Amino acid sequence: MSKFHSAGRAKLAIVGACEADLGQCAPGTSPLDLMAQASLGALAQAGLKLSDVDGLFSASTQIRFATTALSEYLGLSLTYHDGTQMGGSSFMTHLAHAIYALDAGLCNVALVAYGSNQRSVTRQAASPREFNPYETPYKPMLPISAYALAASRHMYEFGTTREHLAEVAVAARSWAQLNPKAWDREPLSIEDVLSSRMVSSPLTLRDCCLVTDGGGALLLTHANRAKHLKSKPVYVLGHGESLSHLNISGMPSLTTTAASISGPQAMKMAGIKPSDVDLAMLYDAFTINTLMFLEDLGFCPKGEGGRFVSAGAIAPGGRLAVNTNGGGLSYGHPGMYGLMLLIEAVKQLRGECGERQVPNCQLALAHGNGGVFSTQSTLVLGLDPS
């Protein structure tokens, strides 16, 4: 018997999930080039054509009108498009909005795409900073100083240690070593993390995500159509989202994120609980993110994240498979990383992950984060148990 019950009622399915080139792309490669590369790959998986796509969802820090630009680039004829911008959590929300649009008959095949060449261009061109009158005068190093502030408070309140944070980075690297596409696959130890250059105390260089080019695409359609396409369908079972603040100085609690709202929403809709989840893909821009999301999503009590990840508990062979592609810390982080979490979740559910494959993976949770713990969006994905 299946461990969850709502997949049989799921009406929409993911039928394509494809990564674009990752790392440092060829000179002249644009974000649109990467979006198009991944989009064509997702279509090929499903056996569909560009002319089948009539719904488009995208966001970018480098392109003002992402859906308009990509539609023109691909020559699409659209009946629906959505450019919601919530930072790194945008693509979980895009997927949910695509489901609503498909269910309402506003489109029949929905494409969600993202691309960034942030490693190849200057930081200013990749993600220009907005002036914030409440924080900018104090010259914080954003976003890392904001996450460092949360990490410091978590350590103060709950006894979390730098070693606990390092466990997250080491686990991510252990998964990356099993992923041929990961950008950084060199061995990494707890001591390596602790002794690496301090960037914003208590976070060192190895507590921080990579800076890479990259992108990806997801393709969705109705479940009855999905069953007749080339790829194995993956069903969207639940979604939740919430936001709490724009600036870190406005965060209600530095140790609790709005994932504590979005996660229960998604799991309630899916009819599951955290212990049912086979795979957790969590937005790990910094090591503190993983600890706080494990707590807020209900995988462990508040304040226990550090102890939960100790002794390789989220590494290969541990109690919970987390960020099996290597995460933003070791796989790659092309600006807004959320779509890559979803692509890995789909690949794991399809059983396509080779050495890093989670055995009997039936249920995956993917959680996106935007801004400085500002916006949170959670999706539950699964297979049809019938």
Image: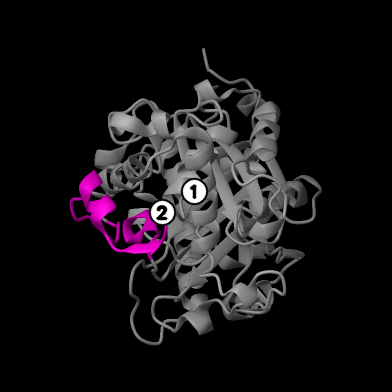
Query: Residue flagged by tag 1: what amino acid is it?
Result: Ala
Query: Residue flagged by tag 2: what amino acid is it?
Result: Pro
Figure label count: 2
Disc 1 + disc 2, Cβ < 8 Å? yes
Q: Is residue 339 magenta?
A: no
**Looking at the image, residue 68 lies above or below residue 276:** below
Q: Is residue 202 magenta?
A: yes
Residue pushed farthest top?
1
Q: Which quadrant: the C terminus? A: top right
Separation (CA) of disc 1 from disc 2: 7 Å
Q: Kindly identify the residue that appears in the image at 35 percent across and 86 percent down.
A: 27
Which span is picked out in magenta? 181-210
* Upstream in sequence: badge 1 or badge 2: 1
**Looking at the image, residue 70 lies above or below residue 51:** below
Residue 103 vs residue 306, the one in the foreground:
306
Q: Residue 275, position in %: x, y?
A: 51, 21
Circle number at residue 202? 2
Q: Is residue 320 left or right of residue 113?
A: left
Classify mark 1: residues with Cα within 10 Å, few (<14), some (14-19) or many (20+).
Answer: many
**Looking at the image, residue 345 lies above or below residue 129:** above
Circle number at residue 151? 1
Residue 155 vs residue 221, the one in the foreground:
155
Helix, strand or loop under label 2 = loop
Residue 52 visible here = yes
Circle number at residue 338? none
Q: Residue 131, position in %: x, y?
A: 67, 78
Helix, strand or loop under label 1 = helix
Residue 346 visible here = no
Q: Kindly identify the residue that appears in the image at 67 percent across and 43 percent down.
A: 258
Q: Residue 161, position in %: x, y?
A: 38, 40
Classify mark 2: residues with Cα within 10 Å, few (<14), some (14-19) or many (20+).
Answer: some
